[in-house]
Image: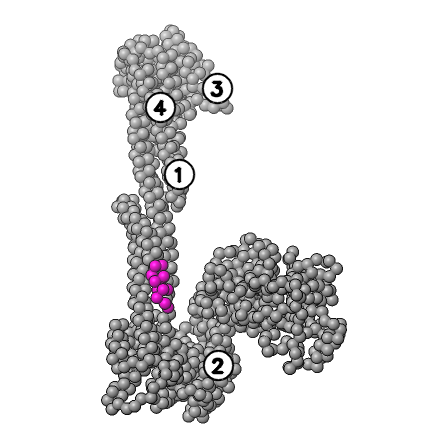
């Protein structure tokens, strides 16, 4: 909305003020008559006192004003400039209407000489500012001067623009003037007091000056409020309104004060028996007061309109501010609602999501109520005639639309979660039914129990497996599709087994009874278990005969071969129909500029995939299709090729998608290629075929494994399935690895990528308190030499995950705490004596266990390598044997590493007074820092302790610098005594010579040997 202007009101106000001061005639007289300090001569006040000329207020019979030049014999004392200034002031005394009619001038020169008459007439003719109607000259009364005037008057009357009447006596004036309009010196009756007239004129001048000041302030105020910027911030507009209202009240006070002063002046000039001259002053004051009243009314009207529009502007800006805040809040809720896509994979998770949705709905309802209030304010604002209805209506409509959209999202979310809860209820019931079926099949129950089991299936909608699968798939989402597929398959398998069981029982009931050999319960259970096999959580019935399994296996093999041929054909059509056409020289001018020379980016190594599948893998399948074991061998032998080719193709997908986005499948050249090939789908769909194919293999192998007999066939298929799952994992890991950004280290130098996954991480640093300690979502990459902590970023336009590098930990510097109190899913990695600790929360206990096991293996391998390197260095320098015994290497029946097979493992003497080892905890001692690699008490069974006995003598294998106050530094060859065995390879020792005691890494220490035993050990070591 533009700034409010009041052009009409302002113009009316200025016109009123102009008329006010013009009609009074006071302002002009003061400005032009009073003069400044630099003007020559006297000011008006000084010129009025000698009575050179008078405006007595008298009127001629034609009602024209009269100005008198009395015969005071002093006219020669006034200069031309003073004369002009005086006349300008006197002509401003009558009203404008009277002045426009013209003036009558009486020049009284009865006591003067005739020459002065001409001088006065010349000055009047030259300097008189108004219209002269007639000049009446009372000629000198002396005989000589009268005679001279009679002669000369006839000569110079024609020289002036106005009429000149030369009067011999005052009686001649009565023809033109009434006696009541003439002063006594002219024989009239007008009681004129020059001193009183001057006093009243001074009062009028002061009042006019006050009016001028008020006029200037009003003009300045109106200009200011008309031209000011009312601002876009409601607080700024409110401050402006308060400031202008304060100034308005101040001006109102001044107007009231001026009115009071004018009324007091009117009282002073209004007296009984007033002459015309004084009556004119009363009329002037009354006229000023009337104009002042009109001015105040117009000023009030102007302010009322302005304040109304300013208040409207304030309401409008407040509405816009509330709209922006509310729109931003609703947009945030809408984004949150759009991001709430998870439906959960378990019943407990679904209930948790329903509670979250309920809390979110309550929060949204509060904001929706506020949005409704903002809309109501907008509708009320639109009723104001000053409002821009279309603008406000669009904002209200936008809020209504966003509110409706948010409500719709919330309702759809609630409906989706309700269906998910219903789906989970069905899945739970189905799983319970399957568990009951397993118990029934494992036991020796009759036909009645089987029929009851089938009858119970109807409680959760299972009447036929196919219909049940379709019903579940209709309610399934992208997250639950895999679970639903697994449950549906389990239900189908169980239904098949129960059906076969029922058929078997029916056939047995129809046959005559025959002797049955008694079988112990354990044997029956084992026999029944041998008839069933499970795969991926699904149970396959042992009741199926070999013919049925062979038939299904044949269908899967046929599907594998047929889909492989189709896949090769589709790859070939992409290469011939798209890539070769793009690379043809005659088509270069038809290509979009961004595609020229970019075929390898668009298609990646698709040609290598086609060559491998057409010339190698498909032929191997065709030769091996008759034997399931040979088919499995094809996958095992081509594992590395699968990984190499598909890793490169998947890693190139983001580049290909970015290039394809610049082209769009609707480009005429690509459309022509698609039309020639007869493809129903665009190029983008066919470029996803390799990704879909590599995931299809493991599904087909699982089906083959399900329908295969035990033995070498199952072993081979399991091996092939494991290989393809490893390939999928490696491809997935490589896709995640290339998505890492901002890594300051060379990932190729960090060894093999062992694991990667998403966790909640709490980081603490004793030296840097600024390190965040609240849980953060981090994607962790575990390499052989480092752990990388990355922040998952929002998916980009290609729907690909990216990770921003945050920090890394070198595996050679970290310690591990397997369990953390309060949550079985948590474990810790730390470094620098727990100066920096990262508490990691896994999604579940299984994931935590897998990561802990892998980290332990990496740490143990590093410890073995470090200790072996120290042994080799020490042996090379001092030529004596160092036998490495390690609590992770030495076990019952296993000789220490470095000892020939069959040789007896060295024994360590136990000091008779040695105390028993303290239990292993997360810290080595109550007063010490945690050790380099700590391990809670839940892995004692996995790693038996074979450390040397307390009290034995030790020797340092290499130099070591202490890190914490609880550690001791070692020098190579220094002797020490073992006082206590800590956890994870730390020993508490006392250095020889009283050099101190503390914790030291066991990798840097070994037991001292006698020279003979050292020599034998040295010989055995060099034999290997």
N-terminal of the pair, mark 2 or mark 3, is 3
Please give the residue where the numbered disc 1 appears in the rendered image: 239
Q: Earlier in the sequence, mark 3 or mark 1?
A: 3
Tell me which residue sits at (75%, 75%) in the image: 1012
Residue at 59%, 78% in the rendered image: 893
Determine the residue positioned at 41% across, 23% down: 30
Query: Depth-wise, is mark 3 or mark 4 nearer the camera?
Result: 4
Find residue 767 and report its horizontal and vertical position in percent: 59, 54
The Cα atoms of the two marked residues, 1 and 4, are separated by 27 Å
Q: Main secondary structure of the magenta part?
A: helix
Q: Which tag, 1 or 2, sits closer to the chain's start?
A: 1
Residue 7: percent from the left, percent from the top?
Answer: 34, 39
Q: Quadrant of residue 815?
A: bottom right
The residues bearing labels 2 and 4 have C-alpha atoms spaced at a distance of: 103 Å
Q: Is residue 784 rendered to the left or right of residue 326?
A: right
Residue at image coords 32%, 27%: 292
Which residue occupies the foreground of this view, 663 or 683? 683
Give the residues in magenta.
Answer: 345-356
Q: Position of residue 785 (x, y in %)?
A: 59, 69
* Residue 723, numbered label: 2
Secondary element under disc 4, as helix, strand or loop, is helix
Q: Residues within 10 Å of mark 2 (few under 14, many from 20)?
A: many
As drawn, the residue found furthest toward the front would be 912
Q: Which residue is identified by label 4?
A: 257
Q: Quadrant of the C terminus?
A: bottom right
The mark tally for this picture is 4
Rendered view: 246 above or below 516: above
Q: Nearer the viewer, mark 2 or mark 4?
A: 2
């Amino acid at each position: 909305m533009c700034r409010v202007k009041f052009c009409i009101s302002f113009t009316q106000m200025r016109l009123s003020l102009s008329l006010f001061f013009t009609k009074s005639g006071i302002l002009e007289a003061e400005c032009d008559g009073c003069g400044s300090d630099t003007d020559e001569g006297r000011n008006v006040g000084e010129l009025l006192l000698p009575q050179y000329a008078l405006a007595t207020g008298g009127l001629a019979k034609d009602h024209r004003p009269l100005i008198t030049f009395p015969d005071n014999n002093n006219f020669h004392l006034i200069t031309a400039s003073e004369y002009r200034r005086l006349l300008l002031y006197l002509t401003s005394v009558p009203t404008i209407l009277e002045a426009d009619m013209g003036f009558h001038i009486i020049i009284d020169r009865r006591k003067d000489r005739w020459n002065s008459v001409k001088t006065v007439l010349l000055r009047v003719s030259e300097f008189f500012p108004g219209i002269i109607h007639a000049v009446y000259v009372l000629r000198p009364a002396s005989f000589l001067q009268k005679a001279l005037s009679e002669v000369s008057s006839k000569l110079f009357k024609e020289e002036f623009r106005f009429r000149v009447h030369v009067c011999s006596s005052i009686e001649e004036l009565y023809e033109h003037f009434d006696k009541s309009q003439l002063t006594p010196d002219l024989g009239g009756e007008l009681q004129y007091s020059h001193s009183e007239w001057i006093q009243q004129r001074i009062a009028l001048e002061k009042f006019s000056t006050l009016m001028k000041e008020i006029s200037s302030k009003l003009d300045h105020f109106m200009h200011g409020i008309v031209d000011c910027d009312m601002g876009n911030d409601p607080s700024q507009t409110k401050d402006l309104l308060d400031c202008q209202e304060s100034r308005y009240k101040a001006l109102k006070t001044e107007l009231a004060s001026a009115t009071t002063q004018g009324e007091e002046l009117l009282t002073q000039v209004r007296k009984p028996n007033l002459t015309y001259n004084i009556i004119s002053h009363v009329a002037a004051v009354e006229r000023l007061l009337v104009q002042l009243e009109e001015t105040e009314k117009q000023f009030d009207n102007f302010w009322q309109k302005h304040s109304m529009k300013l208040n409207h502007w304030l309401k409008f800006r407040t509405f816009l501010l509330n709209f922006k805040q509310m729109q931003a809040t609703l947009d945030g809720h809408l984004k949150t609602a759009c991001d709430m896509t998870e439906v959960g994979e378990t019943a407990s998770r679904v209930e948790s999501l329903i509670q979250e949705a309920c809390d979110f709905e309550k929060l949204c309802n509060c904001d929706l109520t506020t949005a409704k209030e903002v809309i109501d304010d907008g509708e009320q604002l639109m009723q104001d005639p000053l409002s821009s209805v279309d603008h406000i209506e669009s904002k209200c409509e936008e809020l209504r639309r966003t509110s409706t959209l948010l409500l719709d999202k919330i309702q759809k979310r609630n409906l989706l979660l309700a269906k998910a809860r219903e789906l989970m209820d069905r899945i739970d019931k189905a799983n319970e039914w399957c568990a009951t079926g397993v118990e029934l099949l494992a036991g020796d129950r009759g036909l009645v129990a089987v029929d009851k089991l089938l009858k119970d299936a109807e409680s959760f909608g299972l009447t036929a497996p196919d219909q049940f699968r379709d019903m579940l798939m209709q309610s399934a989402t992208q997250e639950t599709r895999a679970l639903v597929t697994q449950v549906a398959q389990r239900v189908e398998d169980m239904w098949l087994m129960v059906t076969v069981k029922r058929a078997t029982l029916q056939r047995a009931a129809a046959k005559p009874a025959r002797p049955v050999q008694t079988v112990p319960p354990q044997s029956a259970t084992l026999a029944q278990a041998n008839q069933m096999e499970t795969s991926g959580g699904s149970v396959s019935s042992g009741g199926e005969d070999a013919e049925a399994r062979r038939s299904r296996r044949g269908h899967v093999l046929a599907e594998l071969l047929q889909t492989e041929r189709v896949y090769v054909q589709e790859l070939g059509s992409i290469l011939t129909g798209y890539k070769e056409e793009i690379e043809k020289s005659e088509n270069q001018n038809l290509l979009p500029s961004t595609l020229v020379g970019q075929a390898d980016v668009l298609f990646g190594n698709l040609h290598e995939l086609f060559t491998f599948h057409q010339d190698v893998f498909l032929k191997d399948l065709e030769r091996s299709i008759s034997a399931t074991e040979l088919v499995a061998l094809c996958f095992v032998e081509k594992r590395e090729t699968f990984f190499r080719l598909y890793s490169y193709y998947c890693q190139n997908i983001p580049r290909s998608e970015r290039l394809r986005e610049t082209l769009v499948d609707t480009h005429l050249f690509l459309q022509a290629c698609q039309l020639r090939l007869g493809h129903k789908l665009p190029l983008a769909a066919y470029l996803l075929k390799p990704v879909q194919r590599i995931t299809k293999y493991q599904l087909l192998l699982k089906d083959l494994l399900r329908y295969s007999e035990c033995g070498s066939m199952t072993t081979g298929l399991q091996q092939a399935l494991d290989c393809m799952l490893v390939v999928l994992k490696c491809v997935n890991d490589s896709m995640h690895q290339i998505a890492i950004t901002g890594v300051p280290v060379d990932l190729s130098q960090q060894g093999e990528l062992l694991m990667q996954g998403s966790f909640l991480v709490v980081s603490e640093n004793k030296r840097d308190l600024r390190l965040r300690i609240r849980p953060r979502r981090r994607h962790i990459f575990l390499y052989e030499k480092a752990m990388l902590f990355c922040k998952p970023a929002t998916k980009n336009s290609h729907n690909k995950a990216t990770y921003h590098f945050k920090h890394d930990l070198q595996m050679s510097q970290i310690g591990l705490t397997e369990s953390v109190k309060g949550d079985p899913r948590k474990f810790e990695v730390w470094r620098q004596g727990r100066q920096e600790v990262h508490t990691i929360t896994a999604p579940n206990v299984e994931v935590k266990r897998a990561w802990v096991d892998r980290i332990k293996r990496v740490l143990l391998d590093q410890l073995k390598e470090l200790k072996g390197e120290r042994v080799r260095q020490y042996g090379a320098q001092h030529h004596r044997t160092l036998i490495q015994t390690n609590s992770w290497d030495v076990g019952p029946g296993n000789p220490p590493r470095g000892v020939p097979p069959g040789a007896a493992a060295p024994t360590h003497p136990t000091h008779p007074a040695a105390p028993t080892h303290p239990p292993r905890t997360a810290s080595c001692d109550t007063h010490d820092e945690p050790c380099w690699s700590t391990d809670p008490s839940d892995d004692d069974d996995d790693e038996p302790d074979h450390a040397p006995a307390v009290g034995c003598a030790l020797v340092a294998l290499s130099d070591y610098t202490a890190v914490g106050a609880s550690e001791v530094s070692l020098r190579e060859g220094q002797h020490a005594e073992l006082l206590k065995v800590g956890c994870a390879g730390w020993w508490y020792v006392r250095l020889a010579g009283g050099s101190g005691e503390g914790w030291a890494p066991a990798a840097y220490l070994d037991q001292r040997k006698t020279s003979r035993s050292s020599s034998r050990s040295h010989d055995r070591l060099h034999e290997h």
